[in-house]
Amino acid sequence: MLRLNPSAHNNAHLLLTLILMALSLTLFEPLQLWVLLLVLCAVIIRVSLYLNWQKHQLSIRTLNLMAILCAIVLAYFGWQLGLLLGMLNLLVMASSLKLMLLASRRDYFQLIGVQFFLLGAALVFNQNIAFSLFYALLCVLLLLSLACHINPSARWPILIKRVGKLCLQALPIAVLMLLVLPKLGPLWQMPTGKGTQTGLSDKVSPGDLAQLARTDDLAFRVTFEGNAPPMSQRYWRALVMEDFDGSNWQVHPYRRKLQERFKGANQTFSPQVSGPAHSYQIIAEPTKQRWLFALDVATSQDNHVWQSHDYTLQSRIPLQSNLAYRVRSYYQTALYEGIPNLDKRLNLQTPEQANPRTREWASQLKAQNTRAEQIIQAIAKFMQQQEFRYTLKPGRMPVDPVDRFLFEEKAGFCSHYASATAYLLRLSGVPARLVTGYLGGEMRGDRYMSVYQYDAHAWVEWLSDDGWQRLDPTAWVAPLRLQFGLEQAVEFEQSFLADAPLANLRNIEWFNNLRGLMADMDYWWSRWILGFDQQNQQDLLKALLGDLKLWKLLLFSFTLVAVIALLLAAYHIRPWLQARQNLPHGYYQKALKLLARYDIRRPYWQGPQDFSMSLATKSDKQSLQHFAILTRCFTHLNYRPLTAQQKKRLVRQMRHQLRKLKRSLAKK
């Protein structure tokens, strides 16, 4: 059955429609394409109804059929999405169907409640300052739609002023709640993303990092409590690759199984540390993966950080949004074997085939040199004498890549040098592995450091009697990379940020100043809003209260509740006083509102007495009598000179007649 169109020229419905469309577009990546098309269909239908091009809404039967089909499709694809993404798609799908059904007040209030929930869900996926401000605007527009729905006859300037005033009143209360409410962990497990959607990957071929290093996407930011280490010591460890098939490196399957087993048993690796340390906070960008970044040897007391036996840090949930965590790095502590004998056994494995020339040369190195240091010196001497080049534009090496790199191309990126060196050391009987992460970082004064994707780097660790030793073969051919960064190391070939759309503007001073300003704004937002965790909260409370004793916390809590109560009272005391000072006007307006519930409204051009007389044909005699007496009292109070005693008597009579009017209308 087709229903009449309640949305023709309904501004509240149109505003709610546009908000759902804008919100869905910001969730373009986590939403499935067919869900976005369903949103578009709902928007087209609702706009057609608003413009009255379409006279009737869709029938209930049609909507039920669409709901069944959509539920079947979502159930078919939902198991691949995971819980969070599946529920998000379900919520947007239900919102679209409800938008097509929008007719009654109940439908509207259900849909606007869902939109507020969707705004909160959207912040899980987009948390930078631009998206946060946009979502705040959508929240204000939702409130404006609600105000327009409740009072459709009010003009837009009045509604905007009212909503803006309410938002400003709520702002200090929201700030107080942000600062003092306990920080809770996530209530659901985040979905795991694909490696192609992240910076680093858990599987690396020699040319992968070269492509990654040609973009200027942010990887993470670091705030040091003291002085930052020099550029050449900023090796940000992320992944340890121990499985090599002759071409690609990846996290060893056995190591991965061990990590899952230890994580399942809630057992974390606690390295023996001593000596001086760097203390800092990292705010990592979303990668949809679990690996984190830190300088060696890192420890963290954060509950959401887990440490592996290969000295890497991992998040207990995938990084679907920004993650802040605190680290202490003991830079003079040795990296001993995390699991004795296992590290050595895993990192001596080599493929039986592939790269025959490299295998032959490694046999010669092993025969001519008895110590690992001598083998390393021989490899370094070979690369320096053969004038190897460091480049972001390496040639393709699909077959026997190590042979091709060492004996033909003699040019590559950091991963080429690290891969070849680690493989040669293994062939020579020295346990070695590939480590990927980032090297360097751009300091913004003395305040913080930004690490970008073009800082991606790979190096080697080899096992000695004193533990794992870091070895960076890039230093043999491109020492500028360690001292000054990637841009200086590849300046000769003009390949730095070749894939960045605005790379040519980096030499313009005003553009760099603007870029720095935007980076500062995003940093402060990430640190003080997104990165405001339990530790920050405890530091704030310690600064205010000193020792966090129970009686101080209770007193502070009661004080906070009192402050919020005083703020709410301050917001409402003035309208209440105004109403008390003008009781006759208030009583009369309440009477008009009672009549309006029964579709009896006073025209704006009609006076109180004329309106009362016009009700003779629209209402029963008893209700007319109560309203007539109330109106007469109102006109006397406003237009006749009266004593104070007479005014009090008439006000009491108005209140008495208002109660009688309410009871008589209720009976009607």
Image (cartoon, rainbow, N blue to C red):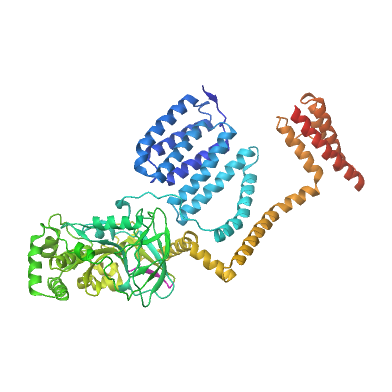
Observer-nearest residue: 256 or 328?
256
Residue extending furthest front?
265
The image quadrant that residue 143 belongs to is: top right
> Which quarter shows the C terminus?
top right
The image quadrant that residue 547 belongs to is: bottom right
Observer-nearest residue: 150 or 510?
150
Residue 290 shows in this picture = no
Residue 421 in picture, x, y percent from top left: 17, 67
> Magenta span has 582?
no
> Magenta span has 443?
yes
Residue 186 in picture, x, y percent from top left: 45, 53
Q: Which residue is drawn at 63% across and 51% down?
A: 165
Q: Residue at x 47, y 44 (%)?
A: 22
Residue extending furthest bottom?
275
Q: Residue at x 82, y 40 (%)?
A: 655
Identify the magenta region: 440-446
Residue 540 in picture, x, y percent from top left: 54, 67
Residue 114 in picture, x, y percent from top left: 52, 41
Is residue 69 positioned above or below 498 on the image?
Answer: above
Observer-nearest residue: 584 or 418?
418
Observer-nearest residue: 527 or 393?
527
